[in-house]
């Protein structure tokens, strides 16, 4: 959904231009990626070769690379605050389908907000927004 057309191309161009301005594609980013990879290797050693689900530290390592590019900040792989944020994003991904309901059922746009708030996952969106603002502050 929404992965083509002029609006998508403009958004993609904007994103790539700004990421390049921040340092994407430059050799300085390679050191950041290598540092995160080493941190991941150290984290994986805790599991001592046991089978299981992929640890959340992978998500945090990816976030760290992007966040260092954007805000020059790094989180520890076991940081509770960022772990709860990733859990919140995961629940947001699971509940995002409600956002598309008004596209298929336009009548929902005319119902009172207090009725559609839960149905459209608006409370969850507000929570994610607040969490992002706290992490940036």
Image (cartoon, rainbow, N blue to C red):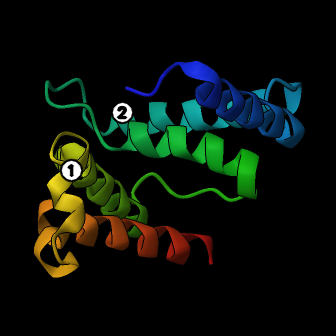
Q: Of the residues under marks 2 and 1, which one precedes in the sequence?
A: 2
> In front here: 23 or 21?
21
Give the position of the N terminus as an image quadrant: top left
Q: Which mark identifies residue 136?
A: none
Is 106 displayed left or right of 6 in the figure? Answer: left
Give the image location of residue 137, x and y in percent.
62, 78
How crowded is the residue under tag 2: few (<14 C-alpha within 10 Å), some, or many (20+)? Answer: some
Disc 2 vs disc 1: Cβ atoms closer than 8 Å?
no
Is 44 displayed left or right of 74 in the figure? Answer: left
Label 2, on which residue?
44
> In front here: 42 or 57?
57
Q: Is residue 34 visible?
A: no
Residue reaching furthest to the top = 4
Between marks 2 and 1 in the image, the one whose residue lies nearer the viewer: 1
Give the image location of residue 45, x and y in percent.
36, 33
Is 123 displayed left or right of 25 in the figure? Answer: left
Label 1, on which residue?
106
Give the image location of residue 119, x and y in percent.
12, 62
Q: Residue at x 21, y 67 (%)?
A: 110
Q: Secondary structure at mark 2?
A: helix
Is 102 displayed left or right of 46 in the figure? Answer: left
Q: Is 72 rendered above or below residue 33?
A: below
Q: Is residue 115 visible?
A: yes
Q: Residue at x 76, y 26 (%)?
A: 30
How crowded is the residue under tag 1: few (<14 C-alpha within 10 Å), some, or many (20+)? Answer: few
Q: Residue at x 28, y 38 (%)?
A: 55
Q: Is 41 rendered above or below residue 57?
A: above
Q: Secondary structure at mark 1?
A: helix
Based on the displayed image, in which of its 4 quarters is residue 7 positioned?
top right
Give the image location of residue 76, x and y in percent.
51, 57
Q: Residue at x 51, y 77 (%)?
A: 134
How far apart, in angstroms, are the residues tagged by discs 2 and 1? Answer: 48 Å
């Amino acid at each position: 959904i929404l992965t083509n057309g002029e609006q998508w191309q403009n958004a993609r161009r904007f994103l790539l231009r700004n990421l390049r301005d921040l340092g994407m594609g430059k050799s300085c980013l390679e050191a950041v990626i290598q540092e995160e990879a080493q941190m991941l290797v150290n984290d994986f050693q805790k599991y001592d070769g046991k089978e299981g689900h992929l640890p959340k530290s992978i998500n945090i390592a990816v976030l760290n690379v992007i966040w260092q590019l954007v805000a020059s900040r790094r989180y520890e792989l076991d940081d509770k605050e960022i772990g709860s944020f990733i859990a919140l994003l995961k629940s947001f991904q699971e509940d995002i389908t409600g956002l598309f309901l008004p596209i298929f059922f336009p009548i929902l746009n005319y119902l009172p907000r207090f009725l559609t708030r839960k149905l459209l996952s608006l409370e969850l969106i507000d929570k994610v927004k607040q969490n992002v603002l706290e992490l940036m502050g």
